[in-house]
Image: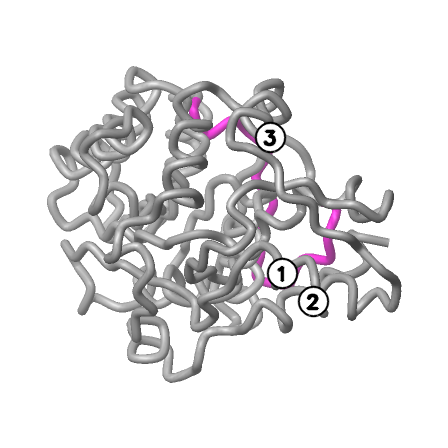
Amino acid sequence: MTILVTGASGGVGLDVMKQLGAEGRTVRAMSRRPLIVDLPDDVENFIGDPTNEGALEAALEGVDAVFVNSVFLNDIETARRVAGVLGRSLVERAVLLSSSCVLTRRELVFANFLRDVMDEFRSVFPNLVSVHPGQFASNALRWRDMVREGVVGHPFGDIRVPIIDPHDIAAVVKLCLIEDRFQGERIEITGSDCITPREMVKEISDMLGREIRYVEISAAQARENLSKGMSPDRLDYFLAMTGSPKPEEQRVLPAVENLTGSRPRSFATWLAANIDSFR
C-alpha cells in the first residue's frame, strides 16, 4: 500500500508523513521543495505542486490512499481541479483535512468556502473522509516575536476554547488513510485542553523561565495587526472562532481518544516539544 501525503512540509502533513513512516508504511511525501527533515526509509520525497494537475497526476501513480489539506486550496477552481484529478485516479481512500467551522458556521465566508471544497471532493469521491479539528495549539506560534520581546498583545484573553496538537490531528488522519472503517465519514475532533490565551501565555512564560506579559487588545487592533498575513475572510473566521465561540465550539470531544486509544496531548506537551521556537 502506497500513501500520498500532499503538503508534506506543512504542520499536519509533516506529522502524518512521520507517523506513517515510523510504522513502516510506504509513503510518497509531496512538497513544493525538498523536505529538510530526516525521512524514514519508506518515505519518498516527491517534488511538485499538488495544485498542478500534471504534477498531482504523476504523484498519484500507484497510490492507494491520499491526504489533502484544504487550507492549501486557495480558491474553488483550484479545489475543483484537484478533486477532478483525484476522481480520475485509482485511489481507494482519500482524506481531506477541513475545519470544525464547516459544521458549526453558516454565516462565515471562509466556512462556506471550506464546505464548498468538501462538497467538490465528495462529488467525485463519495467515500471521502473529512476530518474537522478545532483550534490548533500551533496557532500560538503567531506570538513568537512578541514572546521574544516579553509582551503578547492578543484579544479575548479569558475566552476558553479547546485546542488540539497537530500530532493528534495527524494520528486520526493516519487511521483514516490505512483503515476502511471510516469511509465516507465526517469526523470532528478537539484536544483535551480547554484553555484561554492568557493561560497559554502563562505556560509559555513558565516554561521559558522569564516573565511574558499578556496585554489585552481590541478585536479591531487584532484585525489590523493580522491584516498583512491573513485575508479578510480568514480574519473574520479567526475573530469569530476565538472571540465569540458557539457552545458547540467549546465542547471537549472524546473522538481522538476513542479512535486512537490515546488521550489528546495537552498544550503543555505541545509547548514542550516546540519551546525552542519561542526562544
Colour basis:
one colour
Q: Residue at x 55, y 58 (%)?
A: 15
* Residue visible at 38% across and 53% down in the picture: 134
For the N terminus, give its image quadrant.
bottom left
Residue range of the region highlighted in magenta in the rendering: 36-51
Q: Where residue 254 sits in the image (x, y, percent)?
A: 30, 75
Mark 3 or 2: the one toward you:
2
In the rendered structure, find residue 203 and report the number of the disc placed on it.
Answer: 2
Q: Main secondary structure of the magenta part?
A: loop
Does the magenta segment cover residue 279?
Answer: no
Q: Who's the residue at 27% across and 58% down the image?
A: 188
Q: CA distance from mark 1 to mark 2?
A: 5 Å
The residue at which mark 3 appears reads as 32
Q: In front here: 51 or 248?
A: 248
Q: Residues within 10 Å of mark 3 (few under 14, many from 20)?
A: some
- Which kind of residue does numbered mark 3 sit on? Arg
Q: Locate residue 75: give its quadrant.
A: top left
The kind of residue tagged 2 is Glu
Q: Secondary structure at mark 3?
A: loop
Badge 2 element: helix
Q: Nearer the viewer, residue 169 or 162?
A: 162
Question: x and y percent of residue 110 in the render?
Answer: 33, 28
In the displayed orientation, state which residue is furthest to the top: 77
- Mark 1 = which residue? 200
Q: Is residue 27 left or right of residue 86?
A: right
Cβ–Cβ below 8 Å for labels 1 and 2?
yes
